[in-house]
Image (spheres, rainbow, N blue to C red):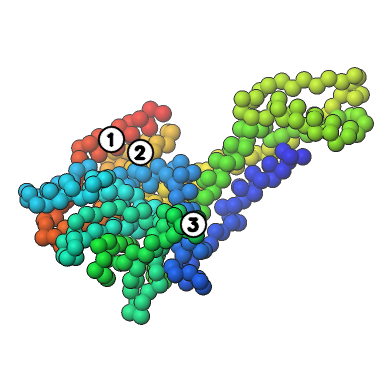
Amino acid sequence: MENKENNRVHLSVLNTLQNEYIPLPEFKKVRGKHWIPYGSYTNEFARELIYNVQNSELHGSIISTKAKMIAGEVIITPDDLQTKLFIEKINPYESLEQMIYKWAWDLETFGSFCINVLWDKAHEKIVNLYHTDASRVLYSPKNEKGFIDTYFYSEDWTRYRQSEYIPIEIPAFKTSKDASELLVSIPSYQAGMSYYTYPDYVAAIDAIKLDIKILDAHNANIDNNFQAGKVITFIAEMPDEEKMQEIREQLEAKQSGAGNAGRTMIVYSRNKESAPIIEVIPNDGLDSMFLTLSNDVRSRILTGHGITSPLLVGITTPGQLGGSNELAIAKDLFYKYRILPKRAYILNTINDLLRINGLKPIIIEDNEEEVVETVEKVEQDSQRI
């Protein structure tokens, strides 16, 4: 009967797209907390977004690729010695290129990014810039003028009551004379949002969760040898509980798991009348239903990310023959509306900080020829599939 239950689970997954709605968190004050939760009590929503990136192959690939696109290929520094020196020693642990990629990844995943700004003793010049993980930053309630004065940071919000993870209060940028201040940058306006924001793929979050569930269901099918299930009825006197458990363990040991797929099960019987009856449970077309659902989920995730052609992020579709001209137009639109605005926002934020030190702005460029060659190669490879 356990396999019947597995089928019911799989069918419930198939119905999720139509029947399941996962409400988004409301970012509001919680009694007894000094911060505004990014979730229920701490940063639950941030952890959920990270889990989705790590467990949905398609979504995770898109996030990584878009972050690389936003970060660009080359940082061009002006012909100015002071600016070059600051960029080269932006902090003792990371290069500016590494931090820009991290800021781009946070911006894509959470819809915001954070820069830790270290000042000199006079609080007039910036000494260092650091990347701060946006998933670990919670906002304080707004002051009477509608602005946030401080942020709370913890290495692990699931253990924030333990002494080593107690949240650290960091002043917001340009609100204090402290040596360390936090600049939290949210580029996209969303109506009704007072504190945090949702990532721009927010409409696809349910589809991303379903993509993960589909993979879990397929893994369950592998453990069941891609079979819908069998009912084995033994024609004999009812054994005791210990004997029933022994028979069950023997069957599962021989038949369960991908490594046992196709194995022959041998059952001994004294005569034909006492031989077990083995009945196969039909799968009712689950395989084709999963295929249809997978295609629908894939389409919803791509649309949520603003991707008109999977080739734009290096994802091939067997049998897809998209024309070069159509792909070129799609690439231009994708870069114009999805990549370059986010790159410009990160770049403008960095340049605003450089100007505080009297330094000249930097720019980010792509190796356009390399980008075009990569897209064309992916297209050619997809046509050969």
- The quadrant in which residue 146 appears is bottom left
| Residue at the spot 74% in from the left edge and 40% down from the top edge | 2
| Residue at the spot 84% in from the left edge and 33% down from the top edge | 242
Marks 3 and 2, the one that precedes in the sequence:
3
Q: Residue 268 at what x, y percent from top left?
A: 83, 20
Name the foreground residue: 215 vs 109: 109
Helix, strand or loop under label 2: loop
Marks 1 and 2, the one that precedes in the sequence:
2
What residue does disc 1 label? 374
| Residue at the spot 56% in from the left edge and 59% down from the top edge | 21
Name the foreground residue: 81 vs 301: 81
At label 2, the amino acid type is Gly
Label 3 and label 1: CA atoms lie apart by 49 Å
Left or right: 174 with respect to 155? left
Label 1 and label 2: CA atoms lie apart by 8 Å
| Residue at the spot 39% in from the left edge and 69% down from the top edge | 140
Q: Are marks 1 and 2 in contact (CB under 8 Å)?
A: yes
Q: Residue 75 at what x, y percent from top left?
A: 18, 46
Helix, strand or loop under label 3: loop
